[in-house]
Image: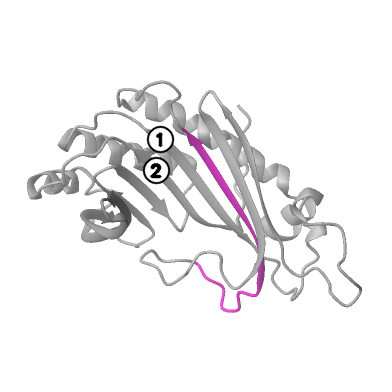
Amino acid sequence: MKEREVYPNAPLVSVSFELRHPQTETLNGRQRALIKERLAGLLPVMRSQQAITQMVEIGPAGAVPHAQSEEYPKYFDRKMTIAASLLQGAIIVETTQYPGWEVLSEILLAVCEARHESSPIDGVERIGLRYIDEIRIFGVDDPNWSEYLIPSLLGPQVQASPDLPLNQWQGASVYGPSAGRSLVVRHATGDGYAIDPSGELRHKTPAYPGKFFMLDLDSFWVPEVEVPVFSMDLLREYGEALHAPVREMFENCITEKLREEVLRK
């Protein structure tokens, strides 16, 4: 297998993993303590969180919107750069300082195994990996993105009028599904940040962010016929299968100039 290049100045600002599973009861104190003990070497800090979901109920009076609250545990590393949320219907592992796929995959597997052993998961409804890049050309106020990215990401090649230059654009492409796997690629120009740096997890944020190009790669699998039984082997298999096209897509979207002048610095 070809060794993946690790860029010293990689533009990744957020990586997240999600496992959706059939609803379970809220984890009790004993179960949370057991998970905390299992994850002590990876994610030793536990905090209680609240998730608010907007729901719509259909009744005699029609559609009635209401909010549903869920309390759940969230486990952090001591640097506050990696976190795992254990909700009633999902496990979410996220990081703002990517340690590499080999390390992250071991962390998310450990989280899922600890969750399953403390309160069994009945099946797998969706597995997803999402990578968000903020590509910046430091020292350049108004980058010529055509030097750093492939033409298909560069917006419409028409002008409205000479006095109205193209300033911002965004787009999305959907690949699949094939055998339940899909890849959604979103891209856009921006000024400032794609990911809010004031969140719970610590970010490596530039002092003067300026303009950036966002690449949002969402790779996921949804079972086609039935909800399969949860297993660690299944997670390992689909984790690898979902990660492969993300790296390949990123490399296919950028130019050698970006690699040499930015990513390898």
Which residue lies at the image location 45% right of the left edge and 24% below the top edge? Answer: 224
Residue 71 x %, y %: 20, 56
Render colour scheme: one colour
Q: Is residue 127 magenta?
A: no
Occupied quadrant, residue 62: bottom left
> In screen coordinates, is 202 left or right of 241?
left
In the image, 79 versus 17, the foreground residue is 17
> In screen coordinates, is 29 left or right of 247?
left
Cα distance between the residues tagged 2 and 1: 8 Å
Residue 219 x %, y %: 53, 39
Quadrant where the image shows the N terminus:
top right
**Tag 1: amino acid:** Arg
73 vs 107: above or below: below
What element does badge 1 sit on?
strand
**Residue picked out by circle 2:** 18
Which circle, 2 or 1, is nearer the viewer?
1
> In screen coordinates, is 130 left or right of 93?
right
Q: Is residue 48 visible?
A: yes
Occupied quadrant, residue 213: bottom right
Q: Residue furthest top?
A: 225
Question: If you read the primary sequence from the N terminus, does the residue marked by circle 2 or circle 1 appear first?
Answer: 2
Q: Main secondary structure of the magenta part?
A: strand
Does the CB distance between marks 2 and 1 fall below 8 Å? yes
> In screen coordinates, is 225 left or right of 91?
right
Q: Residue furthest front?
A: 60
Q: Report the disc number at residue 126.
A: 1
The stretch of residues the image draws in magenta is: 204-221
**Tag 2: amino acid:** Glu
What element does badge 2 sit on?
strand
